[in-house]
Image (cartoon, rainbow, N blue to C red):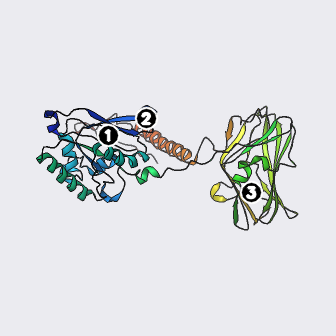
Amino acid sequence: RYEILTSLSPSTKTRQGGALLPLLCKGSHPDRTDAALPVAAGAQALLVSDFCPGGRALSIEDFTAYGGVFGNKQDSAFSNLENALDLAPSSLVLPAVDWYAVSTLTTYLQEKLGASPLHLGSDGAEGNEVIGQVLSMLKSEDVPYTAALTAVRPPRLLQRQSASPMIFSPVSYNDTAPRILFWAQNFSVAYRDHWKDLTSLTFGDQDRLNLTGSFWNDSVARLVLTYEQLFGTTVTFRFILANRFYPVSARHWFTLERLEIHSNGSVAYFNASQVTGPSIYSFHCEYVSSLNQNGNLLVPGTQPSLWQMTFQDFQIQAFNVTGEQFSYASDCAGFFSPGIWMGLLTSLFMLFIFTYGLHMILSLKTMDRFDDHKGPTIALTQIV
């Protein structure tokens, strides 16, 4: 974002200024393609470029950071500039001007005004002093002027735009219709602690993805992913899923029975029975991994295992698939997290203490007979 601030000298109001020349700046906003900036005929122009403490490119946020806005005006780095704007009869702020428009501003001012603009350095204190000297000279000579304040390039913070992660479509195995859907934000595998990221190979170019060997029916599904030249050989990953009916819940549930890795004639197994859910739903989990720090939902069949796997934002569905979209997801995260359990147990313990204390208070009994010094002494029978 760039700002162009204009101000006319107070003496301009008493002068016969004549026609105003339009200053055109191409803007990025569709409603501001041509923003007209009035410049008095015959007036002097002042261009301030890269004026910011610390040598950074200028942005409007710098007036908040260095302008003494919290009552400390004496600490402002823009004291002369602020004073000029306060005394000016008018000012205009034009946001969202493309940065390349600034490079043409100097040439435009030279053509329209017949004078070269004054460029200031990047030091804030020095630039503020130069502004004060120039404006004082123009005021003493009673010269009308227009001042334009802008930046040559965007601030560094605005230039650094975080690249959003690329979202791939899920892998889909089809026979006559989509049967198995599989997706993960990150798919990484390690052999002998040497990690490979298979995300792009799996989801990025699905036309070249080898699904040979995949199979589906109403009770068993098998998704096969084959990669050439992975760790120097051909590696095949097999997701074996089963669909069963459970009378207790009166519905079908699917389970990822195991995950197999085939390479060089050897097979590595991972038990993934915790990846389960109702067959009408898909399964989702933030991490499905063989690493302990990521939940360890994949349990190696042999210990220690040469293979390690991690799926981030994992989702799979092998039954009741309609179209290319996942059904409602059954998430691996339970409703009662460890924090919720701790809070419930602590609350129950405190409630027990409160109930016990209240019971003890209600059990207190006062004496119904009192000793009278004029009468006989009360005899208390000792009960052992």
Q: Using the image, tell me which numbered label, if any, was put on residue 378.
A: 1
Type of amino acid under label 2: Thr
C-alpha gap between disc 2 and disc 3: 61 Å
* Residues marked 2 and 3 touching at CB (< 8 Å): no
* Residues marked 2 and 1 touching at CB (< 8 Å): no
Q: Is residue 254 left or right of residue 141?
A: right
Judged from the image, the secondary structure of the residue bearing numbered disc 1 is: loop
Where is residue 37 shown, x and y percent of the image?
32, 36
Where is residue 257 shown, x and y percent of the image?
81, 48
Q: Is residue 19 above or below residue 163?
A: above
Type of amino acid under label 3: Val
C-alpha gap between disc 2 and disc 1: 106 Å
- Whether residue 318 is visible here, answered yes or no, is no
Q: Nearer the viewer, residue 280 or 246?
A: 280
Residue farthest bottom in this picture: 192
Q: Using the image, tell me which numbered label, if any, was put on residue 299.
A: 3
Q: Nearer the viewer, residue 267 or 228?
A: 228
Q: Is residue 273 above or below residue 362?
A: below
Q: State the residue at coordinates (15%, 38%).
A: 10
Q: Nearer the viewer, residue 140 or 6?
A: 140
Among numbered discs 1 and 3, the one appearing first in the sequence: 3
Label 2 sits on residue:
33
For marks 2 and 1, give the one nearer the viewer: 2
Type of amino acid under label 1: Ile
Q: Is residue 193 left or right of residue 337?
A: right
- Whether residue 377 is visible here, answered yes or no, is yes
Judged from the image, the secondary structure of the residue bearing numbered disc 3 is: strand
